[in-house]
Image (cartoon, rainbow, N blue to C red):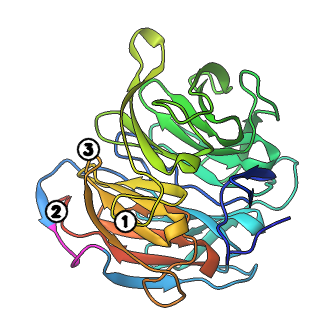
């Protein structure tokens, strides 16, 4: 039974926890170089501001299957050219837009064949790597595409063994090791895969089911900051966990650093957090799905600000599940239950100086 968005919808297909039937929702896992390839960090010190963080700027989309329409958009990401990629979950496709929300292209259809999806939830791209990775969640696999949206190969199958997946949520390229870190939601773990040879060979798993440090309950999104630390939306535990990615001597591991959050609606609390993003200052943005809002934190997890409430007006949300930040500090939110994308100001950020 699928829940409507009048209840909370999450990223997992055919799973139950806390007495709730859990449905798919998307994730924003767009990373490459530290700070994300889809959410690129800048290194210059020129600052700019579009206003206060959370200031509404634009919106687009409506319920449907036409170009530029959505049915439960699960994720949004921004590349270094400013183009946006939206995981249009129920329509089993990826849609591409420019920064103004103008439709550019799409790929995918419903099914389990080559180039088809079943409830996709996330996509990762790295300008240093030739592929785009899509978390094909209900097909329990990762699919790889080139930058012309042509299918290359896939890996993964349903199960809990090494390299098997149960409702994969997100994948991030950890450069320069060229390893793909996948959030294996239904197995309550992360898995490292070797992408250097282009074949997705299993390397190592991280975590197990539980609420201790480094344990997970239905982990969803992952993002990477400018110092190779990565953050995991530990959805069922209502918290964010931070790890250091270690890749010395051709090995990979994840060292637990810190955590923050608990179940609730106060500042710094969460109700099933899902999407994550990081900006050029390593501030972390969280799609606080069950509380219908976005929260912003510094690199240590200190609360900075929040915006949003439940509804369909400008700046309101219905179970937002994906968030991304572009190089100018604009914040894009997959407003899942309202079948649209909203664009906001992220506040003062560092930007590249004008040529």
Percent position (x, y) of residue 234?
Answer: 52, 45
Secondary structure at badge 1 equals loop
Identify the residue at image location x=72%, y=63%: 93
- Mark number displayed over residue 160: none
Which region of the structure is painted magenta? 48-53
Q: Is residue 261 above or below residue 94?
A: above
Check residue 285 for magenta coloring: no
Residue 340 seen in render: yes
In the picture, residue 60 is in which quadrant?
Answer: bottom right
Q: Nearer the viewer, mark 2 or mark 3?
A: 3
Q: Which residue is mark 1?
A: 266
The answer to whether 45 appears left or right of 157 in the picture is: left
The answer to whether 188 appears left or right of 139 in the picture is: left
- Mark number displayed over residue 300: 3
Secondary structure at badge 3 equals loop
Which of the two discs, 2 and 1, labels the residue nearer the N terminus? 1
Q: Residues within 10 Å of mark 2 (few under 14, many from 20)?
A: few
The residue sitting at the top extreme is 249
Picture quarter with the N terminus: bottom right
Percent position (x, y) of residue 332?
Answer: 44, 69
Secondary structure at badge 2 equals loop
Identify the residue at image location x=71%, y=58%: 24
Q: Is residue 159 above or below residue 24?
A: above
Residue 32 seen in render: no
């Amino acid at each position: 039974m699928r829940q409507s968005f009048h209840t909370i919808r999450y990223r997992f297909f055919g799973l139950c926890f806390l007495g709730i039937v859990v449905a798919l929702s998307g994730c924003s896992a767009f990373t490459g170089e530290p700070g994300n390839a889809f959410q690129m960090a800048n290194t210059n010190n020129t600052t700019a501001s579009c206003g206060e963080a959370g200031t509404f700027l634009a919106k687009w989309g409506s319920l449907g299957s036409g170009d530029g329409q959505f049915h439960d958009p699960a994720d949004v990401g921004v590349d270094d050219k400013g183009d946006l990629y939206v995981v249009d979950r129920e329509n089993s496709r990826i849609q591409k837009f420019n920064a103004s929300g103008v439709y550019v292209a799409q790929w995918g259809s419903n099914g389990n064949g080559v180039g088809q999806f079943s409830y996709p939830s996330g996509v990762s791209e790295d300008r240093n790597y030739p592929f785009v990775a899509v978390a094909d969640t209900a097909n329990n696999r990762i699919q790889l595409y080139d930058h012309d949206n042509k299918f290359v190969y896939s890996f993964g199958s349903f199960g809990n063994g090494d390299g098997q997946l149960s409702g994969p949520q997100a994948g991030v390229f950890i450069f320069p090791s060229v390893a793909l870190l996948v959030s294996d939601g239904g197995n309550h773990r992360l898995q490292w895969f070797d992408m250097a040879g282009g074949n997705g060979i299993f390397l190592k798993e991280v975590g197990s089911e539980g609420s201790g440090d480094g344990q997970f309950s239905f982990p969803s999104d992952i993002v990477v900051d400018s110092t190779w630390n990565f953050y995991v939306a530990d959805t069922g535990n209502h918290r964010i966990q931070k790890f250091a990615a270690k890749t010395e001597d051709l090995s990979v591991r994840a060292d637990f650093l810190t955590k923050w959050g608990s179940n609730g609606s106060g500042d710094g609390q969460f109700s099933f957090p899902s999407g994550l993003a990081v900006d050029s200052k390593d501030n972390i943005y969280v799609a606080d799905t069950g509380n219908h809002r976005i929260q912003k934190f510094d690199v240590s997890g200190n609360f900075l600000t929040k915006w949003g409430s439940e509804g369909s007006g400008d700046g309101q949300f219905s179970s937002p599940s994906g968030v991304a930040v572009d190089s100018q500090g604009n914040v894009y939110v997959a407003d899942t239950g309202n079948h649209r994308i909203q664009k906001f100001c992220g506040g003062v950020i560092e930007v590249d100086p004008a040529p």
